[in-house]
Image (cartoon, rainbow, N blue to C red):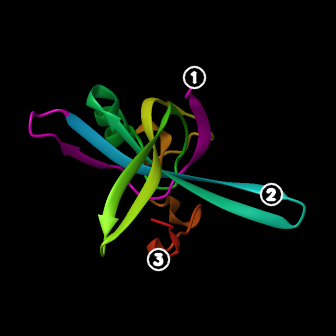
Amino acid sequence: MINKQILQGRLVRDPELTATNGGMAVCNFCVAWSETIGEYTNQLFLNCTTWSKTAEFVNKYFVKGQECVIEGQLRTQSYEKDGEKKSVIKCNVDKVHFCGKKTDGAPGGGTKQADELITVNDDDLPF
């Protein structure tokens, strides 16, 4: 079976870089995009994780509000909260590409002042 996703969207918040116990870099970020059908607009959010050199690349060159294209595979992560089993779909990202307009201000063309591009309240996120 094929599990290959290519998505274009904007980062909802700045990437978060951490490391495993073995020292491998791990970067978590969330990408948002919207679909409009007639008068109805559907906003979609996808949590993403990338590893090693790609994790360091995303953390260094991407910021909140910046447009990007991601390539990866969808994964289901299960967990338990308040005694209830839950699951969430995430993207295990292999590649991240720049796209959209290049703006001055931050590495990779992003801008720390891009908060107005996507305004998302964490309470509105489904995870």
In the picture, the quarter occupied by the C terminus is bottom left
What residue is pinned by disc 2? 36
- Looking at the image, residue 57 lies above or below residue 82: above
Residue matched to label 1:
1
On screen, residue 6 above or below 106: above
Q: CA distance from mark 1 to mark 3?
A: 35 Å
Q: Secondary structure at mark 3?
A: helix
Q: Residue at x 9, y 40 (%)?
A: 21
- Whichever of callouts 2 and 1 sits on the residue coming sooner in the sequence is 1
Q: What secondary structure is found at the residue carrying circle 1? A: loop
Instruction: Work out how far the residue at label 3 is from the one at label 2, CA to CA, in angstroms.
Output: 23 Å
Three-letter residue code for mark 3: Asp
Disc 2: CA contacts within 10 A as few (<14), some (14-19) or many (>=20): few
Secondary element under disc 2, as helix, strand or loop, is strand
- Marking on residue 123: 3
Please report the bounds of the magenta region as a residue range.
1-24
Q: Amino acid at mark 2?
A: Thr
Q: Does 45 lie within the magenta span?
A: no
Of residues 28 and 78, the one drawn nearer to the viewer in this rendering: 78
Q: Position of residue 19 (x, y in %)?
A: 17, 41
